[in-house]
Amino acid sequence: MPHTHLLYDYTVAVYVVRKNRVLFIRHSKNEAWLPVSGHIEMDEDPEGAALRLIDEQVGAGIELIGVRPELSDSRPAIAPSYMSVYEAEHPHQHIALVYFAEADSMVVAPDDEGNEYSWISMNELSYPAYSLADSQIFYAQQALHDSTKA
């Protein structure tokens, strides 16, 4: 999805965990290792965007980690675990809503964009081959810590 606003767009990043590993995707377009991520489209809420991106990018069955309160006067959603703001293309920035999720399998459906996939362990997060940003390492560590099915 192209940028829809001049200065800020909302995005989601989903750190998917399974068997003490976090899923990262090496996108062929920008040759960087990233979690499942993308823009929140104009007609969807953040939780819906997280689920759509999981389906589009990895096809894995997942469950978002978080609490959904039972309320009768609204449609509660699972809140992101973190939020961050980062520069996308100067001066444009992204406001990222960071979710954690648990996968029911380590099988990833290949996409048609030639992306690579890797389930990275806690010890591998700092490997130079992945060149992960400090924020990515932090969120991946937190996702592993918060996961009940790690």
Image (spheres, helix red, strand yellow):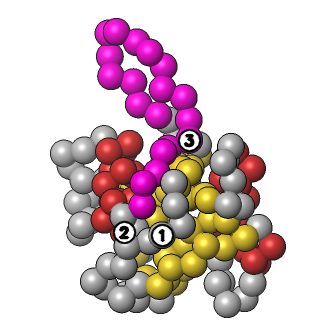
Which residue is rendered at x = 52% and y = 55% of the image?
103
Q: Residues within 10 Å of mark 2 (few under 14, many from 20)?
A: many
Q: Amino acid at mark 3?
A: Ile
Disc 2 versus disc 1: nearer the observer: 1
Relative to 7, is 67 above or below?
above
- In front here: 36 or 119? 119
Q: Secondary structure at mark 3?
A: loop
Q: CA distance from mark 2 to mark 1?
A: 12 Å
Marks 3 & 1, CB-CB < 8 Å contact = no
Which residue is rendered at x = 65% and y = 84% of the image?
131
Q: Earlier in the sequence, mark 3 or mark 1?
A: 3
Label of residue 107 in the image: 1
* Range covered by the magenta-colored residues: 60-78
Label of residue 56 in the image: none
Name the image quarter holding residue 72: top left
Q: Is residue 75 magenta?
A: yes
Is residue 7 visible in this depiction of the protein? no
x and y percent of residue 121 in the render? Answer: 72, 70
Q: CA distance from mark 3 to mark 1?
A: 19 Å
Q: CA distance from mark 2 to mark 3?
A: 19 Å
x and y percent of residue 92 in the render? Answer: 38, 67
View extreme (right): residue = 123
Q: Main secondary structure of the magenta part?
A: loop
Q: Amino acid at mark 2?
A: Gln
Q: Secondary structure at mark 1?
A: loop
Residue tagged 3: 65
x and y percent of residue 22 in the render? Answer: 62, 65
Residue tagged 2: 57
Which residue is rendered at x = 31% and y = 85% of the image?
113
Q: Secondary structure at mark 2?
A: helix
Q: Earlier in the sequence, mark 2 or mark 3?
A: 2
- In front here: 52 or 4? 52
